[in-house]
Image: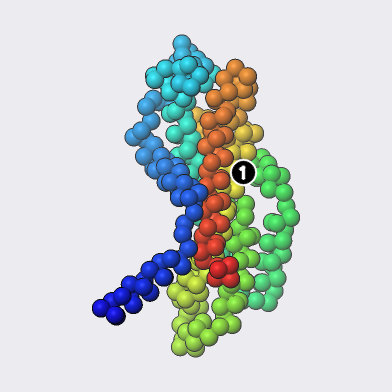
Amino acid sequence: MLQQSTSEALTSKLSSTRPRTPLLVHMALAYLAVFVATAAVAQFIIPYDPAAIDLKARLSPPIGWGGSLAHPFGTDELGRDMLSRLVQSIQMSVSIGLGATGLGAMVGTSLGFIAAHLRGWIEQAILALIDFQATMPFLILALAVLAFVGNSLAVFVCLLALHGWERYARIARSLAISANAQGYASAVRQLGAHPLHVYWRHILPNVAATLIVSMTISFPEIILVESGLSFLGLGVQPPSTSLGALVGYGRDYLARAPWILLMPSLVISLMALSVCLIGDWLRDRFDGTLR
């Protein structure tokens, strides 16, 4: 009985000292779950064809503005259902954001590991490229690339992947140099392991937490950059649409039909806020110096 009561007391003490997840983080996780789930099942929940034009229902207000259940989020200037276009835009923005974030993290981490492993003039060349990318205004770079190469979805995703890849390269390089100075990487290398095996199986798992936190910070930035470029007409081209493109379409009807602009703007703002809250929470959980 004494041992059982002692173990129960230790368990209750450990559970009481374990940091609780804040309510705002729970709400952010729930919103992102709905956000990603909407993008995943968009083809099954869209009530209308997002490109279908119905001029008779042009600029119909949503339910909150006196609209009907036929178009609960209202319609745009061509009578297209805003709920359908919003769901399609979420799917497009999530696909672009995940693709660009993953590609940028892959390129940046690989270059950071190469710089940490080879050192010498190759490291200096990669660091110079990182500094050049960090000082180059991304909007000017985007305008130049889109002017010479042309705009397509693949080109647009690759272009957005250039936004922030230098952050991953700096983090991966510094963490890889620190890991190489520790005993476990040197021991595996002395056993005859290939450098790719050392970085993939031993160094990358130990630095993955920091990289994941950086990805959570970069994802909303890429969504916002995509929204800004689409707002300027440089991003997703018709008949496809994105959250930024919807905001661009709604700017000319802000006085007559504000819901066209307000709804995608609200989705973008809540998404960026949710990811930032989760990123801060993950940083606090993974970084032992903050405990």
Classify 189 as above or below 10. Answer: below
Q: Quadrant of the N terminus?
A: bottom left
Residue 93: x and y, percent? 51, 41
Q: Nearer the viewer, residue 48 or 278?
A: 278
Q: Which residue is painted at 28% across and 76% down in the image?
A: 4
**Occupied quadrant, residue 123:** bottom right
What colour-coding does the image apply?
A: rainbow
Q: Residue at horizontal 53%, vertical 58%?
A: 281
Residue 186 percent coordinates (x, y):
53, 85
Which residue carries the number 1 mark? 225
Quadrant in the picture for residue 182: bottom right
Query: Dot 1 surroundings within 10 Å: few (below 14), some, or many (20 or more)?
Result: some
The answer to which of 149 and 245 lies nearer the viewer is: 245
Question: Is 254 on the left-hand or right-hand side of 3?
Answer: right
Kind of element beneath mark 1: helix
Please tell me which residue is depicted at 47% across the width and 32% down the height of the picture.
Answer: 86
Under mark 1, the amino acid is Val
Most extreme residue toward the top is 56
